[in-house]
Image (spheres, helix red, strand yellow):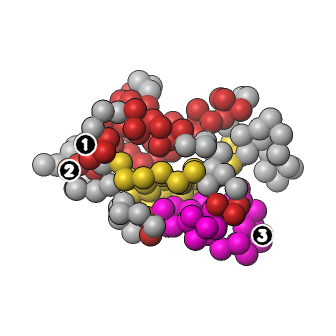
């Protein structure tokens, strides 16, 4: 069974329908390959994993979620080197990459999404203002990262992070 990939227009339409529609597509993609998904979350505190498990039948494609809000949790649960966090900060490209890599390495998943950011309303800096989020995706051994800055309050930043994280999974899943 091969799940079809989406055009940019189809992806935008799917994204406008909310997380459940995007996750339905992700689940079909994962099931077609016999793959599992893991999440590694900091600023979303498990929202991505919760959205995944809101979908009935998710145990067939959702392997596990890591909520690694503290730096120690990132190191202990995902193997992110403490020196990497000290050098770049928790909200950084190297840490997002290490989180995604660690989520795959410490699970039975072939796909992972990682998020680390400043949801606010405090905690921002000139270099990393509130709304700054780094994403890491690992898809069958290929790791990519991206940074976004989202506007709004804490809830808006976290919701935007959830939507972008899921959209990123869809974009990175090549046809089987």
Q: Main secondary structure of the magenta part?
A: helix
Q: Quadrant of the C terminus?
A: bottom left
Position in image of residue 95 (x %, y %):
64, 64
Q: Secondary structure at mark 3?
A: helix
Does the residue at mark 2 contact the one at mark 1 (Cβ under 8 Å)? yes
* Circle 2 residue: 32
Residue extending furthest right? 126
The total of numbered circles placed on residues is: 3
- Image: magenta residue range: 74-103
Specify whether residue 74 is in view. Answer: yes
* Circle 3 residue: 86
Q: Pick the residue in front: 132 or 10.
A: 132
Position in image of residue 174 (x %, y %):
31, 55
Position in image of residue 16 (x %, y %):
44, 25
Position in image of residue 169 (x %, y %):
42, 48
Q: Secondary structure at mark 2?
A: helix
C-alpha separation, residue under disc 2 versus residue under disc 3: 40 Å
Q: Is residue 45 left or right of residue 10?
A: right
* Circle 1 residue: 28
Name the residue at 48% across, 62% down.
103
**Image position of 18 with respect to 37: above or below:** above
N-term mark: 2 or 3:
2
C-alpha separation, residue under disc 1 versus residue under disc 3: 39 Å
Q: Which mark is residue 5?
A: none
Question: Does the magenta run of residues contain 142?
Answer: no
Name the residue at 55% across, 43% down.
46
């Amino acid at each position: 069974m091969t799940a079809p990939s989406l055009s940019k227009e189809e992806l935008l339409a799917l994204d406008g329908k909310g997380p459940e529609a995007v996750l339905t597509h992700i689940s079909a993609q994962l099931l077609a390959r016999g793959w599992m998904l893991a999440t590694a979350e900091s600023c979303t505190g498990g929202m991505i994993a919760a959205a995944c498990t809101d979908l009935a039948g998710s145990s067939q494609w959702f392997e596990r979620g890591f909520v690694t809000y503290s730096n120690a949790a990132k190191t202990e649960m995902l193997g992110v080197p403490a020196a990497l966090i000290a050098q770049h900060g928790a909200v950084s490209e190297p840490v997002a990459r290490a989180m995604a890599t660690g989520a795959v390495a410490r699970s039975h998943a072939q796909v992972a999404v990682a998020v680390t950011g400043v949801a606010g309303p405090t905690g921002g800096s000139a270099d990393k203002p509130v709304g700054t989020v780094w994403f890491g995706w690992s898809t069958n051994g290929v790791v990519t990262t991206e940074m976004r800055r989202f506007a709004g309050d804490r809830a808006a930043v976290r919701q935007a992070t959830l939507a972008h994280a899921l959209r990123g999974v869809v974009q990175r899943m090549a046809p089987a």
